Every structure is written in C-alpha cells, then in structure tokens.
Amino acid sequence: MSHPGAAAAAAVATDPPPPSPSPPPALPPVVEWPEGGVLTRDWVAALASTLDWCSRHLPADRLPTLLPSALVQRLVLAAAAILHREPNLVRVDPRPGQSVVVVGDLHGQLHDVIFLLRDAGFPSEERIFVFNGDYVDRGAWGLESLLLLLAWKVLLPNCVFLLRGNHESKYCTSVYGFEQEVMAKYKDQGPQVYRKFLRCFEDLPLATIIAGCVYTAHGGIFRGTIVLPSKRSKKGKKGRKNKADFAVDPTSMRLGSLDELLKARRTVLDPPWEGQNLIPGDVLWSDPSLEMGLSPNNERGIGLLWGPDITQEFLRTNNLKLIIRSHEGPDARDKRHDLLGMDKGYTIDHEVECGKLITLFSAPDYPQFQASEERYNNCGAYIVLSSPDFATPVFHSFEAVKPRPPAHPFYDFEDVIDSDEELNLDAMDSGTSSQ
Ligand SMILES: [Mn+2]
C-alpha cells in the first residue's frame, strides 16, 4: 500500500500545471502636472485610466498616493478660471462638420462616465460635448468623475461645456455624499480640496443654446424679473459692478427672458429659493409638468413647475426648437404619475407646435446605492445633435458597466429619501459668494 502522500505527489507531477495567478495589476505612476504646464490628450487619457485603476485597486483613502491633493486643487482651479469667464448662457455654435453630444446627470458613476465618453467618441475639434450638470453625489466616485471632465474642459475649453446642476452646491453635497467623499479620500487636506470644488461650482454656467435652436440646462426654464430703481453703488466699489439692479416680482409668475438669464448672479454656494436672485434656483431645480402654466415647485421647495404652454412660449419667443433638460432620474420619475418613466435614459415630455421638451439622464443603474432590494435597472442615454438639423436629436441608450468595483457610500442612503430632493431650507447657504 503506497503512502497517500506519494499518490498526491504523483498526481501533481502528471496533471497540467495550475493556471498561473493573474499578474498583479501594474501600479500606475503618480499623476503629475504635465511638464511645460499644458495638458495633452495623452495626459487626460492617462488620468482616466489611473482614476479607473484606483477605483478598482486602492482603498478610497489611498487615492492621494496616486492623485496628490495639490494636483487635484490645481486642476480644479485651472478649470474654474476658464468657467468663470463664461457667461450664464453659453452660445455653442458648431462649425461645419462639428456635432454636439449632450449628456445628463452622471452622479459619480465613474465607470459609466468613462464608457459614455468612449462610446460617444471623445471630445475633439469634431465633437463638442455639453454636460447638463449633476456630476457628483450619490455615486462613490464623484471626485474622480468631475475631475476627469474638468481635465477635458482645460484641454479643450471650446469643445467641452460643463453646466451647473443642483448637486453642484454646498447644501446638496453636504447631504448626498460628495463632501464626505472628499473628506474620506483627502483626510487632512479634505477641507481645502472641498473648498476648491465649491468655488468651481459657483463658476459653472447655467445654460447653453446650441446652434441657435436648442436650449439646455439642468432643471429648465426660469421666471422673469422686474427692474428696480437704480441705486448707484457708492464710488463704483470693486466687485459690485455685476450686482444686478433687478429682482423677481413676487406678484407675478412671468416666464423669464434670455437677457434676464444672462444678467443673473450665479456665484452663490446654494441658489436661493426666496429673495431677489431666483433665476439660478429656477434653472437648476425646476421640473416640467402636464399642468398648464407656471407654478411653484412645492415638491422640491425651490424652482418651478411648467406646463406645455410655457414650453411653447419659451421656444416661440426665443426662436428655438428644442429644450434638453435633466434632473429627474428613475427614482424621481417613479413618483411622477403624469410623466413617463426613465428606463431608457430619456423621455419626451412636451410636444408642442414649435418643438419638444426632452429630459435626459445619463446615469445607468441609478442610484448606485439603493435601500430597496429592487433596483430600477435603468439605462442611461446621451443625445447627438448634428447638421443639417441640430434640432433633431439622435438618442443613444446604454447599460451600466458591471460589475462595479465594491465601494462604500459616503452618505446615509437608507435614511436620505430616495427620490425627492426636498430641501432643508434652513441648511442652505444662499449668502453671497465665497469669492
Ligand atoms: Mn438634479
């Protein structure tokens, strides 16, 4: 009788060798500002793959070992300086041969952002991108997602346009995860990094008009203002020159004009829900409805609800054909029995004489962290607009990149209401800009 060990040894000797373990993933180099100071496409591509690598192989609090705090802050400030110079309403006028990709909410789902950019074709002189806001919160990689888009903005400032979403605010990021995410990843440096992002949020423009016929914004339309008697500022105090001499007329709910949008003051940490400066809050928080007219958005506590008649009035007055807004995901639409569900990543909400109103949502399988067992399993979508008719959208729906790397949520997703982004008005910072 042979020794059992001998038989085992023989078996090892005759069996094919076990598959060699997969090689350890190569550690990417630390991200450094490029030599000469100017970003290149290769640098942005390497940034994307490093961010992806870190999300898969590094614990969140080790991110600074490859993505130093100083680099993050420099990139955020470089982008903010460019964004700051853009008007509230950016005119995107494609040259012959240029198409425009419009993107909705992303909410920190880095892998889906990377997929979307590759699927649509990266930004270039041939392909302009317009992002409708809500880059951060909810998902685990808001910092990485937004940083990647800011890098594209710095690389191609005239081909990439980043608008503000309601989540690009102090209040939302304190409730829905982004502030905690930055603190968890950057520890001692967290407060400085977060402050730079807040400054950048204040600089994000509010809306675009593409090819003269398509209006895009995160929430949608906005109310009008009245001119106040001019109170000449004392000795032209510096920094006061942009202070608007107008206010919202509390007695009327008149649809605002593009000129009024251009004059609004957007440098607020949290767009106010009351007082004189209501246009930013309206643009970022409003929702369409099937009820006619303009009314306060009581569900949200800020912004407006607007009906098909207002869509028609806005399109006709401004000689436009299409509104593309975002802001409502599958969870929000689950509660809206008047409007369609968000399972394809877009809905057509109003069809009127002058054109259409579309809601576009680009975060598939959203939210990343969900308290209920049943997930929405929604697709995300992006829209391509091209010549000769920029007002005829081509929709591209896509599924989530799976499996997502395991990650911890940075907010209490079981306690924070899934769909309604109801405001705790007392917690909002609607004071003047930090700048
Ligand atoms: Mn939103």
Image: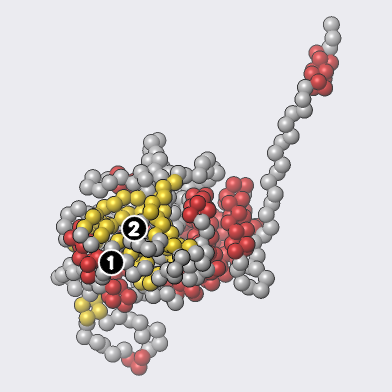
Is residue 376 placed above or below 175 in the rendered structure?
above
Q: Which residue is mark 2?
A: 392
Q: In the displayed structure, does residue 261 sit left or right of residue 95?
A: left
1 and 2 marks in contact (CB < 8 Å): no
Q: Which quadrant of the rendered structure holds the N terminus?
A: top right
Q: In the displayed structure, does residue 218 sit left or right of residue 339?
A: right
Displayed quadrant of residue 359: bottom left
Q: Which residue is mark 1?
A: 320
| Residue type at numbered disc 1 | Leu
Q: Residues within 10 Å of mark 2 (few under 14, many from 20)?
A: some
Q: In the displayed structure, does residue 152 sit left or right of residue 349?
A: right
Q: Which quadrant of the rendered structure holds the C terminus?
A: bottom left
SS state under label 1: loop
| Residue type at numbered disc 2 | Thr
Query: Which residue shows up at 36% across the image and 84% down it?
Result: 240
Foreground pick, 306 / 74: 306
Tally of numbered tags: 2
Displayed quadrant of residue 95: bottom left
Q: From where the camera sits, is residue 64 visible?
A: no
Number of the front mark, 1 or 2: 2
| For marks 1 and 2 on the same chain, the one whose residue lies earlier in the sequence | 1
Q: Which percent across, then down, holds residue 159?
A: 48, 67
Foreground pick, 174 / 253: 253
Is residue 349 placed above or below 426 in the rendered structure?
above
